[in-house]
Image (spheres, grey):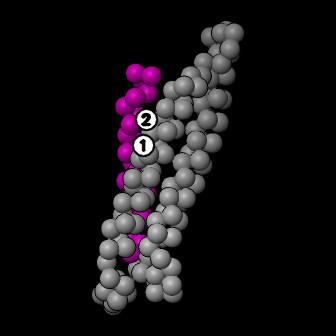
Amino acid sequence: MILLGGPLLLSGVAAAATVFMSSHARGREFALIQAVGSTPPTILLVAVWEAVAYAVTAVILGAAATGIGGFLIADALDLPGAAVSFPAMGLISGGGLLLLLAATVFPTAAALRTEVPRALAVE
């Protein structure tokens, strides 16, 4: 875990920054959705589900890579079972979900505070 801590933290922050920037740039989209009648709580709920979708996809891909790597390492070292720590995977997955929720919901909430005509005005 010590060897993976730095790269894991770096990749988690990079993923959250990417999601944050993509969510932050969608202020006009949120204003258009409000202009046609959607409510701010509905838009926030969509942002939450978007973060959950990102997290579930990351968990599936990460678990597959970790499982394959664990079995390959166990085979190379002649260990009886896979070298995979499921509690650590769960902790990392939960932390990733929280990070993605923050990176998705906070920019959405900030964009919803902008008045619809101002957000839709030509720049």
The quarter of the picture where residue 13 lies is top left
| 65, 98: nearer the viewer | 98
Is 37 left or right of 117, judged from the image as shown?
right
- Mark 2 = which residue? 8
Q: Residue at x 54, y 48 (%)?
A: 55
Find out whether the residues at labels 2 and 1 contact each other: C-beta distance under 8 Å: yes
Quick one: quadrant of the N terminus? top left
Vertical relation: 107 (above or below) 80: below
Q: Judge the density around disc 2: few (<14), some (14-19), many (≥20) Cα neighbours within 10 Å.
A: few
Quarter in which the C terminus is drawn: bottom left
Q: How many marks?
A: 2
Please indicate whether residue 5 sits to the left or right of residue 45 in the image: left
Which residue is pictured at 41% across the width and 60% down the height?
A: 105
Residue 112: x and y in percent read: 37, 73
The residue pinned by badge 1 equals 12
Residue 63 appears anywhere in the view? yes
Residue 4 spot, x, y in % from top left: 44, 27
Q: Residues within 10 Å of mark 1 (few under 14, many from 20)?
A: some
| The magenta segment | 1-27
Task: Decide: is 95 above or below 106.
Answer: above
Point out residue 69 in the picture as x, y percentages from the top left corner.
61, 27
Give the alpha-carbon distance from disc 2 to disc 1, as whole Å: 6 Å
Disc 1 residue type (three-letter)? Gly
Quick one: SS at disc 1?
helix
Main secondary structure along the magenta-highlighted residues: helix
- Secondary element under disc 2, as helix, strand or loop, is helix
